[in-house]
């Protein structure tokens, strides 16, 4: 293959891989308090997976909570978060536990795991890459300065 064509092919391939690698779900904390987050997603093996807890530092802490390679549907993600007297919850029920967890059958809570169903917020992403910003004031009235 001609060196110029090979260079163009390699550049095109690297750009394609870079796009795939960026298709993730990230949660950022824009509140003045530490926030704890759990995420859920469609599992490639069927059903849903839930995982937690990530601790996001106040005023800008971010964490990639779902990798594109972990989900068969990168356009639908779910999260639950709490901290500083605030809670981000929705209508999609998934299993969590008090300590660190990763549950492959997230729609069922097993009694032996001390699981608890939480209402997760459903977010959609046209590109498969989404960053969710958590915002709000602290009960103490503190705010983040940009």
Image (tube, rainbow, N blue to C red):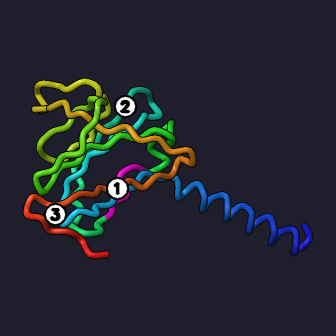
Nearer to us of marks 2 and 3 is 3
Is residue 65 magenta-colored? yes
Nearer to us of marks 1 and 3 is 3
- Write the residue at 45% across / 30% down: 45
Q: Which residues are magenta?
A: 62-66
At numbered mark 3, what does the secondary structure look like: helix, strand or loop? Answer: loop
Which mark, by number, is residue 33? 3
Give the Cα separation between the discs numbered 1 and 3. 14 Å
Q: Estimate how packed mark 1 is, as few (under 14), some (14 to 19) or many (20 or more) residues with alpha carbons within 10 Å.
A: many
Question: Does residue 42 appear to the left or right of 95 in the view shown?
Answer: right
Question: Does residue 119 appear to the left or right of 12 in the view shown?
Answer: left
- Write the residue at 19% across / 57% down: 35
Q: Quadrant of the C terminus?
A: bottom left
At numbered mark 1, what does the secondary structure look like: helix, strand or loop? Answer: strand
Q: Quadrant of the N terminus?
A: bottom right
Which mark, by number, is residue 48? 2
At numbered mark 2, what does the secondary structure look like: helix, strand or loop? Answer: strand
Q: Main secondary structure of the magenta part?
A: strand
User: If you read the primary sequence from the N terminus, does the residue marked by circle 2 or circle 3 appear first?
Assistant: 3
Question: Does residue 79 appear to the left or right of 44 in the view shown?
Answer: left
Q: Estimate how packed mark 3 is, as few (under 14), some (14 to 19) or many (20 or more) residues with alpha carbons within 10 Å.
A: many
- What residue would you read off at disc 1? 27
Residue 71 placed where, x, y %?
A: 46, 40
Instruction: In the rendered view, tell whether residue 122 sits above or below residue 66.
Output: above
Q: Which is nearer the eye, 136 or 43? A: 136
User: If you read the primary sequence from the N terminus, does the residue marked by circle 1 or circle 3 appear first?
Assistant: 1
């Amino acid at each position: 293959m001609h060196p110029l064509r090979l260079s163009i092919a390699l550049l095109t391939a690297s750009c394609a891989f870079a796009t795939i690698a960026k298709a993730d779900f990230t949660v950022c904390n824009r509140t003045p308090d530490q926030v704890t987050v759990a995420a859920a997603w469609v599992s490639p093996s069927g059903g849903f997976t839930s995982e937690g807890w990530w601790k996001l530092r106040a005023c800008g802490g971010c964490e990639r909570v779902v990798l594109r390679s972990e989900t068969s549907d990168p356009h639908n993600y779910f999260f639950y978060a709490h901290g500083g007297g605030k809670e981000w919850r929705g209508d999609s029920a998934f299993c969590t536990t008090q300590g660190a967890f990763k549950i492959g059958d997230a729609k069922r809570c097993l009694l032996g795991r001390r699981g608890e169903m939480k209402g997760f917020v459903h977010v959609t992403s046209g590109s498969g890459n989404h960053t969710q910003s958590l915002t709000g004031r602290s009960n103490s009235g503190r705010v983040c300065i940009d």
